[in-house]
Structures are given as C-alpha cells and as structure tokens.
C-alpha cells in the first residue's frame, strides 16, 4: 500500500523538479535580439554577393531569402543550415566559411557558392 508519507515525498520531488526546469533559461538569442544581421539572397544558380561579412563572437541573425527558384543554404564548418526562406542566430568564430546551396536546384547548382568572412 502506498503511504501518505511516500505520496508527500513524491509531490515534493515533482515540485522541486518543475522549479528547476522553469528556472533553467535558454542561452539562445532570438533573431530580434541579435547584434548583427547578414541577409543572403538566392536566385537561380547564384547568391546576390560573392562575399558576406559578419562580426566574430556576437550573435548574428543570418537570413536566407529565395528571390527566384527554391534554394537552401549550408555554411560549412558551422551549424547554420536554412532550408528555403528563414533565419537563424549564430555566434561564429573568426575565419572564412563557404556558403553552398544545399537543395538541388538545377544545372548551375554546383556553382552556387559564396563566402562568409567572420572578423
């Protein structure tokens, strides 16, 4: 039989667990709160710029817009991946990163490459 004392201990543990879970916030920064922005526009078989720049060590909102066709981006060496239109926030280390279209978009797909310089 389940005793009242065990029931109270379980309730206390549950309340404590819920308190810990709600007290643990996320370190993620929203797109609106990012300190800088980079917008990458894709059209059929090209990005709108050969090189994009972003500050190192700060939350940067990276936006991707499809101007023509359907494209997605991956920034190699990072966790940044956007399928179609969208935005993510990244905090990147200094360096040069390759941006590629990661959705097969036609005959010029393999030439759809750009660069992100983080300094």
Image (tube, rainbow, N blue to C red):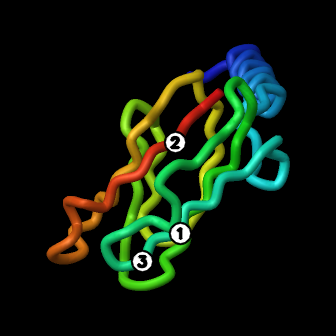
Residue 95 at x, y percent in the picture: 52, 25
Q: Disc 1 on helix, strand or loop?
A: strand
Q: Residue at position x 73%, y 19% from top?
A: 13
Marks 3 and 1: CB-CB under 8 Å?
yes
Q: Residues within 10 Å of mark 2 (few under 14, many from 20)?
A: many
Inter-mark Cα distance, 3 to 2 = 18 Å
Q: Earlier in the sequence, mark 3 or mark 2?
A: 3
Label 1 packing within 10 angstroms: few (<14), some (14-19), many (20+): some
Secondary structure beneath label 3 = strand
Q: Which residue is mark 2?
A: 116
Residue 11 visible? no
Q: Which residue is mark 1?
A: 41
Q: Label for residue 8?
A: none
Residue picked out by circle 3:
43
Viewer-closest of 71 and 14: 71
- Please, which residue is most extreme toward the bottom here? 68
Q: How far across and down, in percent of the image, does residue 63 sit?
A: 61, 60
**Taking 37 as reference, is 54 above or below it?**
above
**As drawn, 73 above or below 21:** below
Looking at the rendered image, the quarter that the C terminus falls into is top right
Estimate the x, y position of residue 80 in percent, counting from the top left.
48, 44
Q: Earlier in the sequence, mark 1 or mark 2?
A: 1
* Above or below 67: residue 104: above
Please give the name of the residue rendered at 39% of the width and 31% of the height, measured from the top-left corner.
Answer: 77
Closer to the camera, 72 or 68?
A: 68
In the image shown, does 72 or 96 lie closer to the viewer? 96
């Amino acid at each position: 039989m389940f005793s009242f004392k065990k029931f109270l201990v379980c309730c206390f543990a549950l309340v404590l667990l819920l308190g810990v879970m709600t007290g643990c916030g996320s370190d993620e920064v929203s797109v609106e709160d990012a300190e800088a922005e980079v917008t990458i526009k894709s059209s059929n078989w090209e990005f709108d710029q050969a090189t994009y720049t972003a500050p190192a060590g700060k939350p940067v909102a990276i936006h991707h817009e499809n101007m023509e066709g359907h494209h997605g981006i991956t920034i190699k060496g990072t966790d940044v991946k956007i399928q179609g239109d969208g935005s993510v926030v990244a905090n990147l280390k200094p360096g040069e990163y390759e941006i590629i279209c990661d959705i097969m978009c036609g005959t010029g797909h393999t030439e759809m490459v750009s660069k992100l310089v983080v300094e």
